[in-house]
Image (spheres, rainbow, N blue to C red):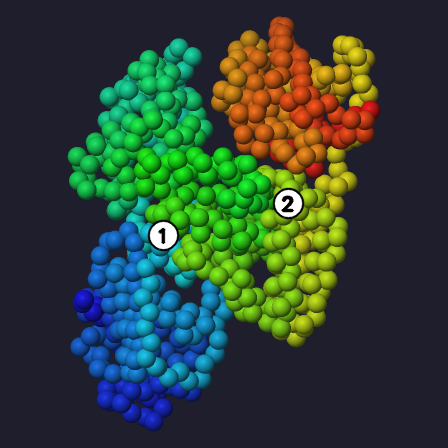
Amino acid sequence: MNFIFLAAALVSSSTCSGPSGRSGADSEPMPLFENGRSAWVIAVPDAPSKYMSYAASELSGTLEKISGVKLATVKATAAPKLNVVKLSSDSREDLHDEFSVSMKPGVIELWGNTQRGTLFAVYALLREKFDARWYWPGESGEFLRKFSRYDVKSWQKKWRPFFDLREMSICSIWRHRHADTERWFPKVFLNCGIQTPSIREEIDYVRRTSGHHVSLPVTMKEREQIFAEHPEWFSLLNGKRDIKGIAGCWSNEGFYSYTVSNLVKRIRDNKAVLANFFVADIVPRCECENCTVDPDKSARWWKFYAKLIEGIRKEIPGMRFAGLPYQEYRAIPGIKVENLDHVDYCQYNRCYYHGLDDPGCAMNARSMKEFRGWAAQAPLGLYGYEFDVFTPAVYLPMWRVFSDEMRIFKQMNLKRVKTEYSVNLHRLANTKKGPGLPRQNIGQLASRLAYYAWAMSAFDPDIDMDGLLDDFCSHVYGAGAEDMKAYHNMMADAWGGMKTHVTYFSNPARGAAARFLPVELEKAARVRLEAAASAAKGDARASSEIALDIGCLDVWAKFAKEAREGGELRNLREYSDDAFNRVSWINAKSKSGRPQKTRFKIYHGRKALHVLVECEEKENPAFNRGTAKNDAHNWSSTSIEFFIDTGDGAVRHVAVTPAGGVWDVKDGDKSWNTNAEVRPSFEADKWMLEITFPYEAFGGKPKSGDLWRFMVIRNACKGSKFSSCGWPVNAHRDFSSAAKLVFK
């Protein structure tokens, strides 16, 4: 093991000398600091890397905030034998972390297998021995105690995190960069996800490259040039090579060579040691005979990826790769997936309220069956969407969800865990685009406890989550800690106890609010918050944080009130025969843009709910009618979309194409079928769909007085100049905005 030392000037003797005036070169062990003075120095290499310099500066800077004294950083040759903090690293490029802290009077040794590991050792020392905490990014999330004296006693500890790779991936911000957030990542022992070039040069981390790069250019100007020369590289769609077919023709050798060249460049530009590439996002794939010869859509991608890896390794021997089971290639393929370090299963099909093994959650049972099934095909990782569940940003009491999932992921022997991290701290400040957001509308602050809990449980999947909550509350809320812990537990109980399910992402928060926050819970929560505020009175910092949590509750309460009171009411009397001529038209509305005229009729029959849709079509006959096949909708065509809640808490989602195809799921379960009958008809300037939904598929005929939440949307064709519209409004998955159908 080699020590790495940083050349730097010693601080003045008045700052650096020990309490008795003796220098750090003396043979007697001294306190690390006492009354703003210290005889200690930090030792790092003669030819230091920027990584080790950063680790030394983080240690020195934090100890100065704690003690009032700044330790000098010196060369090895200038370092004394005693009263020295030694930073060392094996300087390896491992994909995993090992690090240790060893203390005895006069000497502290901080070691890492990588230089990243040495930085982790710095933060581990500060956490374990000085009670330092970084609960969220930026200065406001740093909590440090003041010490007047610290005596170094014998102690040692070594860490080897279970998950090799731990990442919160910055999303929803320009180029996925945010300096405060990226500097926070190593403070909570995350080892991936730094994107800002200057920070990459300061903080050692797992250098990887990834993204939807198995693709032709997204920008039209570049695409047009390539299409003019090589149309055969583009996907075959509806019988012709299409410039919109950016997923490419995987069986074309020219597209293959073009892709390999692009990926090699990306790896080299990023100096990556791990690459995870995936295909163009949410676009149709090539339909040519050679590309579709294998009916297994998932296997098609993994075969092509294996071929790409082979080509890349000819240019970069030994390059390591990961994969991403996503979209149609998330399904378990009928082939082994080889030559990969791991695959990151995209778990956007789970329920975010309940435990992964909760016997009452069929949604999670289906998700985990597929996830665990992948274990036979490849080493596993996770690509999670836990913090994407709702829009806009709200307080998410999800730490028990994380404790549960990390325990299970450890049992599954995952190599990597990742979640998307929605960054909007930059929106606190006023900009040319408008005023800054209040703190309760900043996701990283509203859900600061949840973000911290995810990171720390990724570092230690066996972490005591109740102890973590204690720790958070005692530091953040001062004398209000006990009431705030009770408040947070109350909200976590309500979250995990909901009788409905939520999956996918960007769900409207208002749609869940009434179930999450009934009036009785809101009243009880406010009692706890008021008690905490009273207890913390006089503590400006704790009071500010409690005020933030009150603001977060106000956001949910507003949504809950709107959800209880919202929704257009429509009484449905029963008709024994065709009654479209006896019910009135309902006009669709649009959130924004210019929709095409659309209207609906609905009536309650003896055995089914009947819907008639009439759509003006100014793009007829060229508009995309979609497929007539069931459960095959690709969302690029026009469709009529339904969201239906019969009162049992289940989310039924149905899409019908003008061609007559039906795509239907219940709580994400595609095996559920509405058995809907669809009768399309077309005229010169409009088209119509008559749709019959048998009550049998919805649990039986509604009784008199039963209430359904119902929403119907006309989705404009992808690329259309018109906007989508619906009734009562165009609001996906938001049952608080849905119409209330009362059966008579």
Q: Which mark is residue 457?
A: none
Element carrying mark 2: loop
Most foreground residue, 28 or 162: 162
Location of residue 248 in the rendering, given as x and y in whole percent from the top left corner:
34, 23
Image vertical order of residue 242 relative to residue 367, above or below: above
Q: Which quadrant of the view contains residue 221?
A: top left
The amino acid type, in three-letter code, at marker 2 is: Met
Name the residue located 70 percent from the left edge and 58 percent from the top edge. Answer: 525
Q: Quadrant of residue 212?
A: top left
Residue drawn at 72 percent across, 58 percent down: 524
Residue at the extreme bottom: 20
Tell which residue pokes out farthest to the top in this image: 684
Expressed as whole percent of the image width and height from the top left, the position of residue 463 reads 45, 60
Which residue corresponds to mark 1? 163
In this figure, which residue is indicated by the disc labeled 2? 498
Q: Is residue 688 above or below residue 250?
A: above
Q: Can residue 308 be seen here? A: yes
Q: How many marks?
A: 2
- Where residue 657 sits: x, y (%)? 57, 17
The first of marks 1 and 2 along the sequence is 1
Residue 722 makes an appearance in the image: no
- Camera-side residue: 585 or 739? 739
Q: Residue at x 62, y 10 (%)?
A: 680
